[in-house]
Every structure is written in structure tokens, then in C-alpha cells.
Amino acid sequence: MGAQALRVLFLSQRNSARSMMAESIANAIGRGRIEAHSAGVHPARNIDPLAVELLEHAGLPAPDHAPRHVREFSAFDAPPLDFIFTLSDTAAGEAPPTWPGHPITAHWQCKDPESFGTENEKRLSLLRTRAELERRLRVFINLPMGSLDRLSLQAQVAALSGASS
């Protein structure tokens, strides 16, 4: 993992809120050092408008693409990935494809906003998720990537799953 931008993929169930937020935050925090993408195992039709609102409120642009399927990133001709973070238990429980580039993977559980009943509960959940993801990604971007072996780096990114707990 040299001077090139780290290619990172965030996976969730629908790729409509959590993973889209992670993509936006990572690209902003990374400032060219991260090339973040997002996808879902069962993508929604559109990005969640509440996720867009909360990203814009934080001064972050929402991704300019519709939810994507994980197949776009696991195809044999897809560019290699350096890291894959699953954000939902459903995405983490799926049988993993063979990823181009043999990326380091970790599960960074974030609550599913769809599991909350009211709009206010969903908003609060997504606010917490945005803050959790930002904390994790700020630590992630500052890991000494060049001086850690693969096993140590795997342990470090996995440990970030409890960064906000």
C-alpha cells in the first residue's frame, strides 16, 4: 500500500444510508489518500433522503450515484480493493465473494436506521452512525499503513469496530 490512494469499499444491506455516509466521510477525511466507494447486498433504488440531509448538515456532499450492488466491486475485472468494511450484520453474514486485490476486511457494525419506528428515532440513529463512522475513519486514516504488516493492520482495523462503544 504505497503512495496511491487506498481503495476502500463500505458494504451495507441497501447501500442507501450507512455505507453512503461512510463513503462521503472517508472521501472527505482522506483528502485524496482514500478512494472510497459503497455498495449493498440488496441495493435500494435511491439514497435515503435523511442520510443526504445529515451529510449536507455536516458540510459533506452526498455520493452522486444511486445505490450500487456489491457485484460491481467483486467482478473479475474490477479494480483491486485495499479494505472492505461491512457496516450491517446482513452484509457481514453474506458469503464473501473473491475480491480483487485480496483486501483487508473488518466488520464495523452500525445500527440499521430502518429498524427504528419513528422519523426522530431514525434521525438520531443516523446522527450517531455519522459520528461513529467519522471517529473510526479519523483513526483509520492515521494508522501507520506503511509500517504495519498485513496481520497487524487487520487487527488494527478490526479493533476500530469498538471505537465508539
Image (cartoon, rainbow, N blue to C red):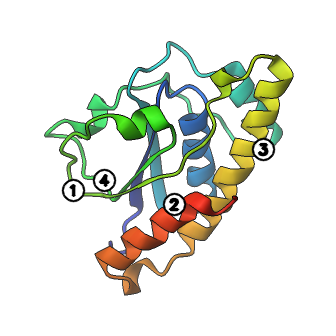
Residue found 78% across the figure and 44% down from its top: 59
Residue under circle 3? 59
Mark pair 2, 4: CA separation: 15 Å
Q: Are marks 1 and 4 in contact (CB under 8 Å)?
A: yes
The image quarter containing residue 149 is bottom left
Q: Earlier in the sequence, mark 2 or mark 4?
A: 2
| Element type at mark 3 | loop
Q: Position of residue 83 (x, y in %)?
A: 38, 57
Is residue 2 or residue 105 the one in the foreground? 105
| Element type at mark 4 | loop
Residue under circle 2? 32
- Label 3 crowd (10 A; few <14 / some 14-19 / many >=20): few
Q: Is residue 74 above or below residue 32?
A: above
Label of residue 81 in the image: 4
Q: Are marks 3 and 4 in contact (CB under 8 Å)?
A: no
Mark pair 3, 4: CA separation: 27 Å
What amino acid type is highlighted by mark number 2? Gly
Q: Earlier in the sequence, mark 3 or mark 1?
A: 3
Residue found 69% across the figure and 52% down from its top: 132
Q: Are marks 2 and 3 in contact (CB under 8 Å)?
A: no
Residue under circle 1? 101
Mark pair 2, 3: CA separation: 17 Å
Label of residue 125 in the image: none
Q: Is residue 34 left or right of residue 99?
A: right
Q: Earlier in the sequence, mark 2 or mark 1?
A: 2
Mark pair 3, 1: CA separation: 32 Å
